[in-house]
Image (tube, rainbow, N blue to C red):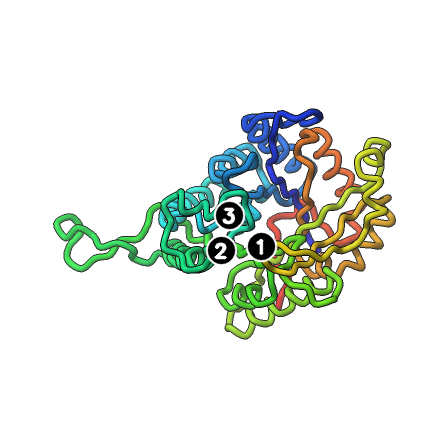
Amino acid sequence: MKAFGFLSFGHYAPVPGSGTRTAADMLHQTIDLAVGADEIGVNGAYVRVHHFARQAASPMPLLAAMAAKTERIEVGTGVIDMRYENPLQFAEEAAALDLIARGRIALGISRGSPETALRGYEAFGYVGSEDPRGADLARDKFELFLEAIDGAGVVQGDPQQVGEGRYLAIEPRSETLRDHIWWGSGSRATAEETGRKGLNLMSSTLLTEATGAQFHELQREQIDLYRAAYKAAGHTGTPRVSVSRSIFPLVSDMDRAYFGLRSAENGDQVGIIDGFRSTFGKTYAAEPDVLIEQLLADEAVMAADTLMLTIPNQLGVAYCVHILESFAKHVAPALGWKPNTDGPVEGYAI
């Protein structure tokens, strides 16, 4: 592990105890949290994307605001549901964001996760999928998105304005954007495909597989297969890999009140999600010295260059900054962490 950031689900609801009662609360607090995290050396600020739910749904304006108000921290998503996206509009917006952020972005993209809406992407106008989960739709649109950000001509030009036989690329374009695209992979097979495409890998606390292996071992296998496929395809870069975990250093009475009981529930879980028998990673909540020992033994955390900490955004900016600062001060240095003042994060050599 070289770097860590926070991953916010962007929950908001007018319920007792919530500090994010409205969408406006959530958006402004996410920006403030990114600013606070940037100041203490955290490397990344990432948001989940869900539609038809009281969570962050339209990430580009939020990420642009986060990038504009910070100096060093990477901003991104984990993940954008490609089924809902217009690939060419998304390509334009992603390029603009990359330029605004001066390359400090990590756009995680995937087919999308289970949602409250039934084929909600069809309400957005994206129909014709033959897959009940819309995977074919997401795949085809993602391929067009990649072509667009690579500068391919995607529309025939008006011959009266640009001459005969010309095809036009999207504008604006960012030459660094392709390096900042991640695929959110939930299985070993999709991780290998991500490696063959030369993209960065984003893996979470859930894998849509259950082999009997512990979660961190299964995820480490996923990472190894990804890197092997990346190298076998002839790519020569140092691709990025991130994993996410729920981690809470217990350094105050408030920490123990909120999360102390989690330490007694410290185990993986297996269940069914989106029709797949899946493995869910455990929550880490313990004193810093215990956390260090546990995380050093987590093979996937140590194999990835970036660790995303899922934060309880409804508990407010100050408390979430406290979690990040506690991790930065008491745990992360023992895992190999380098603060954002040391420069942009690079992947491990393959």
**Looking at numbered disc 3 in the image, what kind of residue is underneath it?**
Ile
The residue wearing badge 2 is 133
The residue wearing badge 1 is 274
Sequence order check: which comes first, mark 2 or mark 1? 2
Q: Are marks 2 and 1 in contact (CB under 8 Å)?
A: yes
Q: Is residue 126 above or below residue 213?
A: above
**Looking at numbered disc 1 in the image, what kind of residue is underneath it?**
Asp
The residue wearing badge 3 is 80
Along the line of sight, which residue is nearer the eye, 227 or 10? 10
Question: Which residue sits at x=63%, y=43%?
Answer: 7
Sequence order check: which comes first, mark 3 or mark 2? 3
Q: Are marks 1 and 3 in contact (CB under 8 Å)?
A: no
Q: Position of residue 290 (x, y in %)?
A: 86, 49
Q: Are marks 3 and 2 in contact (CB under 8 Å)?
A: no
Q: CA distance from mark 3 to mark 2?
A: 15 Å
Q: CA distance from mark 2 to mark 1?
A: 8 Å
Sequence order check: which comes first, mark 1 or mark 3? 3
Hey, which residue is sitting farthest bottom in the picture?
Answer: 232
Q: CA distance from mark 1 to mark 3?
A: 17 Å
Question: Which residue sits at x=79%, y=54%?
Answer: 267
Question: Which residue sits at x=42%, y=53%?
Answer: 175
**Looking at numbered disc 2 in the image, what kind of residue is underneath it?**
Arg
Q: Nearer the viewer, mark 1 or mark 3?
A: 1
Of the 4 image quadrants, the one containing the C terminus is bottom right
Q: Residues within 10 Å of mark 1 (few under 14, many from 20)?
A: few
User: In the image, 14: left or right of 234?
Assistant: right
Of the 4 image quadrants, the one containing the N terminus is bottom right
Q: Position of residue 303 (x, y in %)?
A: 70, 61
